[in-house]
Image: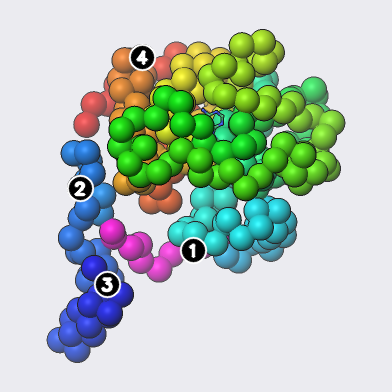
């Protein structure tokens, strides 16, 4: 639907005494690969990602190093989720931080900021080609969507420089995921951010990271709810079902989160 048609529909509805949100919440859904994606908007509620002064300082630094790449839909609320989930992960008694899909380091900066005052030898492992999404392992749909080659305007040197303030506890693992997992020295994990955009790599990340999660460890999946990355949702749902673990929780930001209980068993099955 074009913005003009949408505006006309909203105007007609409001003139008839309706509310703007009713129109937005009832727009026709999109279907991709059998998944339903609604375009619903959320009503007025507290949005600390816009007003929390400390968050704004951290976010603006992350946005700066992303050089314009963060101007897309809903990045502030996604960044807020990441920062808060990193803080939650710090309540776990042990485990490292891991991010798969780093690009220029914006999302890593958020989690590293939460981690920086904690000490205790916690490492933050960063996995990426630092040269864009590789063509290898893409599905036909991902090739058609031209996901391969995206995010290539970056280098390892640039991301290292962007995150220089945290160098003491960062471990860079440049190269193809999952190949770089071998010998990376990742032990137990308390925080994992998976933002790698493709199904096969997302599955490999889950297989590598979930068995390493400590009690109270968290996983944030950035690509879960987006029609463009439907394979990421599929492999995630498949993985948690196969492992007989409770599924992830989809958020209205497009992310999904999983909080690990060491004694987790599937108890809900919607
Ligand atoms: C959406 S970007 C990550 C954005 C980042 N989290 C941020 O804060 O801006 C996705 C990243 O995944 C990386 N990537 C995708 N597939 C990969 C693979 N198989 N191995 C290594 N890196 C991969 C790309 O190089 C790209 O930097």
Secondary structure of the residue carrying numbered label 3:
loop
Query: Which disc is residue 2 wearing?
Result: 3
Residue 200 lies, in percent from the top left, at 41, 25
**From the Cβ of disc 3, is ligand 1 less than 8 Å away?**
no
Residue receiving disc 1: 46
Of 202 and 109, nearer the camera is: 202
Q: Nearer the viewer, mark 3 or mark 1?
A: 3
The residue under the point 62% across, 47% down is 153
Residue receiving disc 4: 243
Q: Return the disc, 2 or 3, that comes first in the chain's sequence.
A: 3
The magenta stretch is 39-49
Q: What is the crowding at mark 2: few (fewer than 14 residues within 10 Å), some, or many (at least 20)?
A: few
Q: If the picture is divided into quarters, which one holds ligand 1?
A: top right
Write down the quadrant of residue 96 in the picture: top right
Query: On screen, 67 above or below 119?
Result: below
Residue receiving disc 2: 31
């Amino acid at each position: 639907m074009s913005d003009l048609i949408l505006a006309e529909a909203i105007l007609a509805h409001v003139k008839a005494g309706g509310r703007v949100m009713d129109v937005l919440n009832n727009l026709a859904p999109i279907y991709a690969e059998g998944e339903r994606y609604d375009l619903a908007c959320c009503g007025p509620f507290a949005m600390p990602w816009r007003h929390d002064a400390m968050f704004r300082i951290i976010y603006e630094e992350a946005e700066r190093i992303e050089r314009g790449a963060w101007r897309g839909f809903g990045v502030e609320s996604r960044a807020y989720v990441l920062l808060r989930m990193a803080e939650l992960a710090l309540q776990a008694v042990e485990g490292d931080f891991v991010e798969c899909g780093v690009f220029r380091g914006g999302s890593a900066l958020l989690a590293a900021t939460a981690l920086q005052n904690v000490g205790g030898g916690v490492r933050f492992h960063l996995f990426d080609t630092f040269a864009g999404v590789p063509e290898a392992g893409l599905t036909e749909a991902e090739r058609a969507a031209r996901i391969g080659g995206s995010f290539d305007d970056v280098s390892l040197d640039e991301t290292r420089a962007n995150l220089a303030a945290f160098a003491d506890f960062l471990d860079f693992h440049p190269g193809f995921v999952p190949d770089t997992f071998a010998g990376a020295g990742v032990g137990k994990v308390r925080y994992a951010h998976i933002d790698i955009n493709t199904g096969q790599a997302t599955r490999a990340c889950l297989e590598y990271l979930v068995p390493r999660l400590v009690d109270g460890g968290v996983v944030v999946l950035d690509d879960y709810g987006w029609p463009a990355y439907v394979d990421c949702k599929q492999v995630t749902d498949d993985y948690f079902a196969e492992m007989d673990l409770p599924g992830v929780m989809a958020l209205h930001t497009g992310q999904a989160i999983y909080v690990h209980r060491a004694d987790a068993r599937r108890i809900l099955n919607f």
